[in-house]
């Protein structure tokens, strides 16, 4: 989560939806600062599925009246990215199949609807530049680059697809994505 006092805006960082790239760009060109000093803090030890501080969906004290916004991503592409990202950083996950990972971790990635409900405005990552322009964030748009790219290429089975569709069902509707057939 990032705050810009001058614009009275809060960027709610929805994980696996361009947050690292956009956050770096906002910090460099638009005066946003990290809302919590402990961004590297681990998850709560008794709740491994809890939010990292930077992914908290609630604005910090004193910013409740600020315009809040977030970025959303197609739920299936977001889940693929989460799988690939987690495999890079957690050795115990690297050997799991996509189905095994989905069975074990589908509840660990927050639903995007949490961020949409907390926001005044949300942007689909597929329309990122137009959405940022609507917020008045147009300076140096050409310098907004993809970062933390984790690739695609996962093997979906009928089971994993059904499980992810079921768990993130509301994200499709609230975020403006069609359910695949």
Image (cartoon, grey):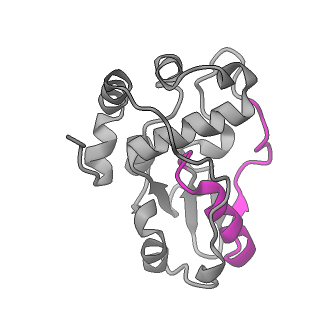
* Residue 123 visible in the picture: yes
Q: Is residue 71 magenta?
A: no
The x and y percentages for residue 123 are 42, 63
Specify the farthest residue to the bottom: 139
Q: Is residue 166 left or right of residue 132?
A: left
Taking depth in this image into account, of 141 and 54 the one nearest to the observer is 141
Residue drawn at (62%, 47%), measured in percent from left and top?
150
The x and y percentages for residue 12 are 55, 53
The x and y percentages for residue 81 are 54, 43
- Corner quadrant of residue 171: top left
The x and y percentages for residue 127 are 41, 69
Residue drawn at (60%, 27%), measured in percent from left and top?
50
Residue drawn at (42%, 78%), measured in percent from left and top?
134
* Residue 124 visible in the picture: no
Taking depth in this image into account, of 40 and 67 the one nearest to the observer is 40
Specify the farthest residue to the left: 181
Q: Is residue 18 magenta?
A: yes
Q: Is residue 36 left or right of residue 97?
A: right
Taking depth in this image into account, of 62 and 111 the one nearest to the observer is 111
Q: Is residue 121 left or right of residue 2?
A: left
Which region of the structure is painted magenta?
14-42
Residue drawn at (79%, 40%), measured in percent from left and top?
40
Residue 172 vertical placement versus 163 (above, below): below
Q: Quadrant of the C terminus?
A: top left
Residue 96 vertical placement versus 176 (above, below): above
């Amino acid at each position: 989560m990032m705050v810009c006092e001058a614009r009275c805006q809060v960027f709610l960082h929805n994980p696996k939806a361009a947050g690292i790239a956009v956050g770096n760009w906002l910090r460099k060109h638009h005066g946003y600062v990290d809302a919590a000093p402990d961004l590297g803090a681990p998850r709560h030890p008794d709740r491994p599925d809890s939010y990292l501080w930077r992914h908290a969906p609630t604005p910090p004290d004193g910013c409740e009246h600020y315009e809040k916004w977030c970025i959303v991503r197609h739920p299936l592409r977001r889940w693929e990215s989460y799988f690939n990202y987690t495999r890079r950083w957690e050795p115990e996950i690297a050997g799991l199949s996509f189905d095994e990972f989905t069975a074990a971790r589908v509840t660990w990635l927050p639903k995007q609807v949490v961020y949409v409900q907390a926001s005044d405005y949300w942007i689909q990552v597929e329309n990122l530049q137009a959405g940022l322009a609507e917020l008045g964030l147009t300076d140096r748009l050409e310098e907004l680059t993809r970062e933390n790219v984790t690739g695609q290429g996962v093997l979906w089975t009928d089971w994993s697809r059904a499980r992810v569709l079921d768990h993130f069902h509301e994200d499709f509707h609230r975020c403006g994505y069609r359910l695949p057939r």
